[in-house]
Image (tube, helix red, strand yellow):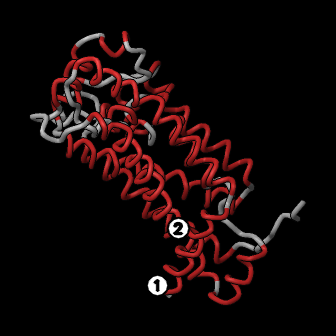
Amino acid sequence: MVKKAFCIAGYSIRQWLTDPRIISLFIFMIVLIWNDLVVIGDLTGMTGIYTNPLIFPFFSSSPLKQLILLSGVVFLFSDAPFINSNQLYVIARSKRRPWALGQVLYILFASALYFFILMGVSVLVLLPYASFETNGWGKIVRTLAETNAGAQLRLQFAVSGKIVSNYTPLEAFGLSFLLCWGVGCFLGLVMFVINLKFNKRVGLVVSAVILFLDLLVTNMLPLKYFHFSPVSLSRLSVFDPSGASEYPTVGYGFAFFVVSVVVLSVLAVVSFKKTPIEIAPEV
């Protein structure tokens, strides 16, 4: 069963290469990241100082930028549970449980690949201006964190001094990937389960509520509500490593995503086994 599930997940990933929706999504996201990060390259050109290229943790810690990135995740998984005429044949051959497990694995792999590609692009943008021998974050990043240079350059996201102070570049980059991966899996599985029980419109509405809850918590609600906002828990700047404030800790964030992904994965497999298969007519 596990071998079948991996084969089904791999088949779904390969469909990206011929899917205009997915190709368009990645083009849009790559252009967004490129345009926003190239400004830092302009600063290095003016100063002659190289920058550390692991800037993505700051980009994804911007509520607006993370909202856009995760809107891409919602778009990627909007057709969950991914049943079409071709998949009917696959279900008939593999049976329901292996197929459902394969789709869960697809969501996990697709979320990882989505952020792996976008984070890779964020590094590539700055490679012409970059050096990993910058004594930690380096002068460029510290200047952006400690001064208003970013505003003067019209940088579209803030460079968080909290991240600079609490994490090394590699730590921040790795943690950001894991947290983004966690929320991507969470959103994909939520849409899978809800779309299976109701319909895709309900799944999109619930996903939109989850996305905009982060903006509500960030701008209006008390700090303790960060603990209940999945999108907030994917932004590294939200966490307090010391645990001395009302902000969540990194450990809490990882525990939240691990538990929720496991629970949702089980629900997805069990629910699909009991749900009649219906395909909307193709126009």
Q: Secondary structure under badge 2?
A: helix
Determine which of the numbered discs, if any, sits on residue 60 in the image: none
Mark 2 residue type = Tyr
Q: Which residue is mark 2?
A: 106
- x%, y% of residue 235? 36, 37
Mark closest to the chain's N terminus, 1 or 2: 1
Q: Amino acid under label 1?
A: Val
Q: Secondary structure at mark 1?
A: helix
Q: Which residue is mark 1?
A: 2
Q: Position of residue 129 (x, y in %)?
A: 28, 33
Relative to 14, does residue 22 appear above or below in the rendering? Answer: above
Residue 233 appears in which quarter of the rendering? Answer: top left
Q: Is residue 117 placed above or below 152 in the rendered structure?
A: below
Please name whichever residue, 162 or 156, is drawn nearer the observer in this view of the structure: 156
Question: From the viewer's perspective, is 78 left or right of 231?
Answer: right
Rendered residue at 57%/70% (across/down): 14
Report the Cα–Cα distance between label 1 and label 2: 13 Å
